[in-house]
Image: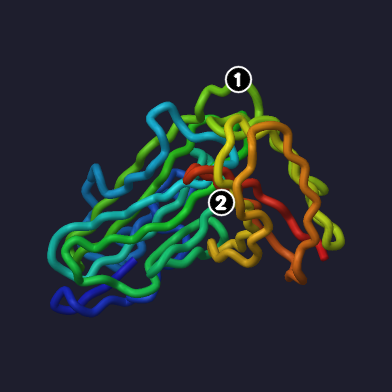
Amino acid sequence: MLLMASDLLQSNPTGAPAGRTGSPGDGGATCFTSGCHSGAPTDATGIITTNVPTEGYTPGSTYTVTVTLSGNGRKGFQVSPQKADGTLMGSLSAGSGSMVISSKYITHTSAKQTNPAVWTFSWTAPAAGSGAVDFYGAFAQTTSITKKEKITINEKTATGINENGFVSSLEVYPNPVVGRNLNMGFDLKKSGQVKIALIDITGREINRMVDGFESAGNKQYEFELPEMNRGIYFVQIQVNGERLSRKILVNN
């Protein structure tokens, strides 16, 4: 991931090459095995944390993932949520100081010398029935100090698909989107301040479609989307601070 002289100069200070997480799907490769670092990685805990509830992720919901790397030195990281065979689970959206590469990995955009060094980014959970997701991460602190970690996040056992604490029976269609019309329907379980926004793959809001108080009950919306490039986007519902996202594919 990173190479330093006197712990200050790195070969990849603006991001690690893809496939350096130490996961089985990446062949166990890290910055050490690729020769960028002389120190073999030690197993660590507490570097990768999330705000996923203890009961597990809700399919399609978006969560915050935090990487916290302590110690002196210029630091970097790479993380990927995968199955054991390397299949990407869910989707990643970069935060400040990070970037997504090959759609599957997230890494630093510039090394950090702060102690601790902290990065946050977003992860949208996969579809219902995907099961447990393993987050693999490799971390560089100095040339000779590297670490790796794996955390497992279980899928929440729900009473039905598209169910959570504030919305049920969520439908977003057509998906893939052809043209500029998008329909959404759901049952709002309790009244509250509702925001519905269109988010791009980087996590940037590109269109606020609903922003106001809504009473509980069945909701049906028809939106005219702005001009957008072909690709993956997210429709995000926020009710009283709780969030739920659904991925859409725009084929225009």
> Residue flagged by tag 2: what amino acid is it?
Ser
- The dot on residue 159 is 1
Depth check, front residue: 61 or 216: 216
Tell me the SS state at disc 1: loop
- Residue located 65% across and 30% down the image: 168
Picture quarter with the N terminus: bottom left
Q: In the orientation shown, which residue stands out farthest toward the top?
A: 159
The image's mark for residue 33 is none
Using the image, determine if residue 222 lies above or below residue 102: above
The picture places residue 96, in percent across and down from the top left corner, at: 40, 68
Report the residue marked by disc 2: 91
> What residue is shown at x 32% (from left), y 54% (from top)?
67
For residue 189, side relative to residue 229 (left or right)? left
The amino acid type, in three-letter code, at marker 1 is Thr
Mark 2 residue crowding within 10 angstroms, few (<14) / some (14–19) / many (20+): many
Question: 104 above or below 155?
Answer: below
Where is residue 72, by image quadrant?
bottom left
Q: Where is residue 221 in the image (x, y as percent from the top left)?
A: 77, 47
Does residue 17 sit above or below 93 in this rendering?
A: below
Q: How many numbered circles are shown?
A: 2
The residue located at (68%, 58%) in the rendering is: 209
Residue at x 43%, y 35% (from the top left corner): 153
